Structure formats: structure tokens, C-alpha cells
Amino acid sequence: MTDFNVSISPHEAMEIIDNEIVNGSITEVKVDEYIRQPDDRIIAVMVYEKHYYRAGNRLTLTVVVDNLRGATHIHAVGGGGGQGFLSFDWGASGNFEDTIFKVLRKYIIE
């Protein structure tokens, strides 16, 4: 799980994330996006999927972007992977999740 604030607007953060994940790989797609904008605030939930060869399965990445407390907040969690009863993803979901931190690193604020 990843949590941090950034200095850019929610829409800018969403655009950067989409560009990196959807346009950055042929195995990654946006499954769904849900956005609510009460007043001047926004909350967006985006779900991505990626075929990760190392895990031998599809992984998901759920990203929540909001500005409910002022600064734009990013929350991301990866999941899935592996096959069978005792499935492991060998760190692949964590790597997928780390993509969000890496692409927004220069905008992170305290």
C-alpha cells in the first residue's frame, strides 16, 4: 500500500498515472474509473490491470486520488497474481504499485 500527497491537482495526477500505465505498456489497461466531484473537491478511483509474466497471471492496481483535505492525496494498492491455492506474485503486485510512486515522485510533498 502506498500513501502520499502531491503538489499537483488531482486531474494532473490522474493524467500522469494514466499516461504511464496505459500508454507505457502493451500489457496494462484501465479497467474502470469512478469520479465524484462534490463542490470544489474530487475523489477518483481508478482500477488498472496488467499481465505480469513473472507472476504468471493478471495483477490489479487500484488508485484513489482525492483532494478532500486540501492537498492532492494518492493511495494505491496492488493485488492479484499467482495461480492455484497457494498463489504468490513474487513481488509483482508491489512493483506494479511502485509505478505510482515513481511517476509522481517529483511532485511529492510532506
Image (cartoon, grey):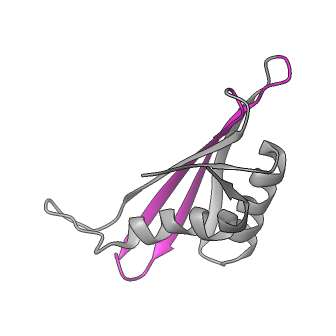
Q: Residue 64: x and y, percent? A: 60, 42
Side (left or right) of 53 relative to 21? left
Residue stretch rendered in magenta on the structure? 39-68
Side (left or right) of 61 relative to 108? left
Residue 37, compared with residue 54, is above or below; it is above
Q: Residue 29: x and y, percent? A: 64, 63
Query: Could you tell me which residue is drawn at 25 percent across and 67 percent down?
Result: 83
Query: Could you tell me which residue is drawn at 57 percent across and 69 percent down?
Result: 99
Residue 57, compared with residue 14, is above or below; it is below
* Residue sticking out furthest to the left: 86
Nearest the camera: 32 or 6? 6
Q: How many labels, in total?
A: 0
Q: Residue 93: x and y, percent? A: 40, 65
Nearest the camera: 83 or 93? 93
Residue 41, compared with residue 7, is above or below; it is above
Query: Could you tell me which residue is drawn at 79 percent across and 26 percent down?
Result: 41
